[in-house]
Amino acid sequence: MNIAIQGILGSFHHIVANQYFGDTIKLTECLSFDEMPRLINSNQVDGAVMAIENTLAGSILSNYALINEFDLKIQGEVHLPIQHNLMALEGQLLSDIKEVWSHPMAILQCRKFFRDYPEIRLVEAADTAEVAKQIREKQLMGIAAIASKKAAEIFGLNIIESKIQTRKQNYTRFFVLKKNNGNIVIPKVINKASLRFVTHHQTGSLSDVLRIFANFNMNLSKIQSLPIIDDPWNYAFFVDVIFDNYQQFQNAIEKVKENVSELKILGEYQQSKRKYAS
Ligand SMILES: O=C(O)C(=O)C[C@]1(C(=O)O)C=C[C@@H](O)C=C1
């Protein structure tokens, strides 16, 4: 099985791919999220792992847009505890560090730590682990990476400070994606779905839809609005719903269809347990 990940070995996406699919998969490393839909839709990979939201930094809205635009299907989800580490070449001290390079989402999650070091420049890079690799290969002095412990181990860097994210409890939710009609692993249980819908321009139209979910005993775990690019100042809603009874979910969908102008099921999958870090 060939799975695309954002980033390289040692990235958080790598950890998630191994956790979901096991250690024997082949990884296709991408240095942007934008590369993934093309790889999936041209069958160059069987699926992909894509971060979608983080408890400190919020949603990655552009990834919602990619899933919709390229008609990808959500096959599963993983909630991963994220501990960020500041790492550099052996012997480098925090006082030696002039610049810190990392993925923008990782930088966002560590903003507070760097408030005490205003002299350090924060530089956005393509991936957390890729920076660790560069520091090692090019023997970069004065540069540190924000990345996983696994990246420090793989690239032989020294961790200067661990757990530098703004709050110790920090989680990222990742989607496992596949081609619209493909199937990588058949989920044993389906108790969660992600939907995109557009409501009519009438008073109360969103609350009507939300009421349907409540009436059918479905728990709304997330709602996110996104601009519709062809229709300025109008929005599509992306929601996640959790349910016990699949038939009940389908009945709710039939009812929702009568109340919206557009509806798309982005994926039906098994809810992942939200593990808590110790
Ligand atoms: O290390 C990775 O896998 C990344 O691509 C960085 C990334 C992200 O894309 O959101 C992954 C998870 C963490 O929330 C922080 C950053």
Image (cartoon, rainbow, N blue to C red):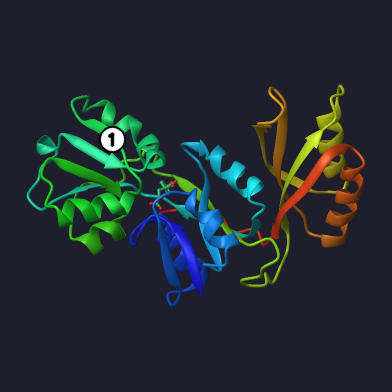
Along the horizontal axis of the image, is 104 left or right of 239? left
What residue appears at the point 64 percent right and 62 percent down from the top-left corner? 179
- Is the residue 92 above or below the residue 155 in the image? above
Residue extending farthest to the bottom is 24
Residue 276 visible in the picture:
no
User: Identity of the amino acid at label 1?
Assistant: Val
What residue appears at the point 44 percent right and 78 percent down from the top-left corner? 24
Provide residue 102's location: percent of width, then percent of height: 31, 43
Which element type, helix, strand or loop, lies under badge 1? Answer: strand
Displayed quadrant of residue 168: top left
Q: In the depicted view, which residue is nearer to us: 242 or 75? A: 75
What residue appears at the point 7 percent right and 50 percent down from the top-left corner? 91
Along the horizontal axis of the image, is 219 left or right of 32? right
Along the horizontal axis of the image, is 89 left or right of 62? left
What residue appears at the point 12 percent right and 40 percent down from the top-left corner? 142
Q: Residues within 10 Å of mark 1 (few under 14, many from 20)?
A: few
Quadrant (top left/top right/bottom left/bottom right) for the C terminus: bottom left
Provide residue 126's location: percent of width, then percent of height: 35, 46
Provide residue 130's location: percent of width, then percent of height: 29, 53
Displayed quadrant of residue 234: top right
Residue extending farthest to the left is 91
Q: In the depicted view, which residue is nearer to us: 192 or 10? A: 10
Provide residue 117's location: percent of width, then percent of height: 21, 28
Q: Residue under circle 1?
A: 123
Residue 75 visible in the picture:
yes
